[in-house]
Image (spheres, rainbow, N blue to C red):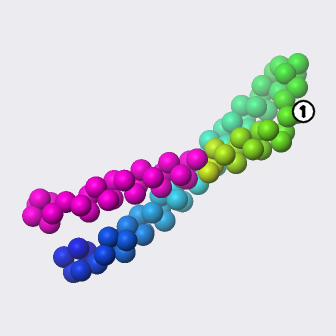
């Protein structure tokens, strides 16, 4: 795309969008697995009283999703900018 005059941000945009979706999905999967673990622990060890602290767990799950998206976005942006800084002659 650089050979045809596309700007760096025009090339990067689809990759960043996809990385946000991947980060969101990974955060949701991690959240579902943690909820499953917490439900099991609450059933197996009722003295932990995990049902009492639902607001903290909701904040933790929200932060998990946001950080998953942020890490995915940051790593994709870093890789794409490093790749696009190369000269066209160095690619082949």
- On screen, residue 45 above or below 51: above
Side (left or right) of 43 relative to 5: right
At 52% from the left and 59% from the top, the residue drawn is 20
Residue 39 visible to an observer of this rendering:
yes
Residue at position x 71%, y 31% from top? 37
Of the pair 28 and 69, the residue shown nearer to us: 69
Is residue 58 inside the magenta stretch?
no
Question: Residue at the spot x=48%, y=51% of the render?
Answer: 72
Up-down relation of residue 24 to residue 32 (above or below): below
Q: Residue furthest bottom?
A: 4
Residue 90 percent location from the top left of the image: 11, 59
Does residue 61 sit above or below 24 in this rendering? Answer: above
Compare residues 18 and 88 and report the one nearer the observer: 88
What residue is drawn where x is 37% and y is 67%?
12
The overriding secondary structure of the stretch rendered in magenta is helix
Q: Which residues are magenta?
A: 67-92
Above-or-below relation of 10 to 78: below
Residue that mark 1 sits on: 52
Quadrant in the picture for the N terminus: bottom left
Q: Estimate the x, y position of residue 59 in percent, counting from the top left.
A: 75, 44
Q: Secondary structure at mark 1?
A: helix
x, y (%) of residue 30?
A: 62, 41
- Residue 91 painted magenta: yes
Q: Is residue 32 visible?
A: no
Q: Nearer the viewer, residue 80 or 38?
A: 80
């Amino acid at each position: 795309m650089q050979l045809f005059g596309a700007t760096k941000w025009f090339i990067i945009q689809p990759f960043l969008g996809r990385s946000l979706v991947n980060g969101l999905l990974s955060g949701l999967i991690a959240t579902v697995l943690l909820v499953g673990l917490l439900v099991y622990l609450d059933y197996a060890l009722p003295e932990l009283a995990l049902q009492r602290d639902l607001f903290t767990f909701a904040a933790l799950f929200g932060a998990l999703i946001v950080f998953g998206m942020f890490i995915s976005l940051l790593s994709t942006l870093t890789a794409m900018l490093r790749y696009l800084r190369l000269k066209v002659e160095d690619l082949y």
